[in-house]
Amino acid sequence: MKKVLFILVMALIGFGNLNAQDAKFGVVSGYHNLSQKLSAEGASVSVNAGGFYVGLSGEFKFSETLNLQTELQYASASLDGESMNLIVLPIMAKYYVSEEFSLQAGPQLDFIVSDSEDANVFGLGLGIGAGYDISEKFYISTRYAFGLTNRIKDAPSDFSIKFNIFQAGLGYRF
């Protein structure tokens, strides 16, 4: 687990070295909702847990309208006193529709860091979202990631738990 986190941090730092004059770094935080969708034998049930996230962000400019935005987040969600803690790494292509408004899409990785003996620790999702630049320094964003990975270890073919993640937050660029 420590090796994976180290590799992710080094990848974020490496992106910054590609074209430093067109890179912006900052911090981000906001509301985090984890929806655990259990599917079994054709039926499904969802359980939602609300919480928060905090993290670091990097935005790398490729053209006037296309950027790459990455974040490294710590997220926590609680349901009935039980807490689920995650490291979340969204890697979003960010297309600017106007100077302030952007649409986002891309993969989102997450790693369970709380007690998870019977769960697959690594998860992959497909994220979509939108953002609005309030000013040169401040922005807001919202994102929904559809879970693609079954989180039950050694699950039969008709049983699965997938994590869908909704986030809404405020970011500050340095």
Image (spheres, rainbow, N blue to C red):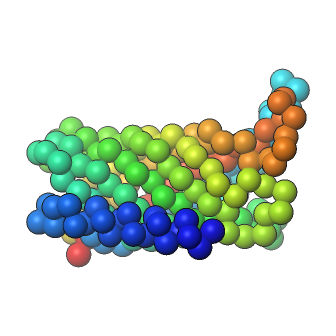
Q: Nearer the viewer, residue 16 or 82?
A: 16
Q: Residue at x 32, y 55 (%)?
A: 69
Q: Quadrant of the C terminus?
A: bottom left
Residue located at (23% from left, 49% from top): 67
Position of residue 45 relative to residue 89, above or below, is above
Identify the image quadrant of residue 39. top right
Q: Residue 118 vs residue 29: left or right? A: right
Q: Nearer the viewer, residue 124 or 3?
A: 3
Q: Quadrant of residue 147?
A: top right
x and y percentages locating residue 62 in the rendered image: 17, 48
The answer to whether one can see residue 138 in this image is: no
Residue found at x 70% / y 58%:
121
Q: Is residue 108 left or right of residue 105?
A: right
Does residue 68 appear in the picture of this structure? Answer: yes
Position of the N terminus, as image quadrant, is bottom right
Disc count in the image?
0
Quarter of the view holding residue 74: bottom right
Q: Is residue 11 left or right of residue 21?
A: right
Q: Residue at x 22, y 67 (%)?
A: 17
Q: Is residue 102 above or below residue 19?
A: above
Tell me where residue 120 appears, x and y as whole percent. 74, 53
The percent coordinates of residue 158 (x first, y second) are 84, 29
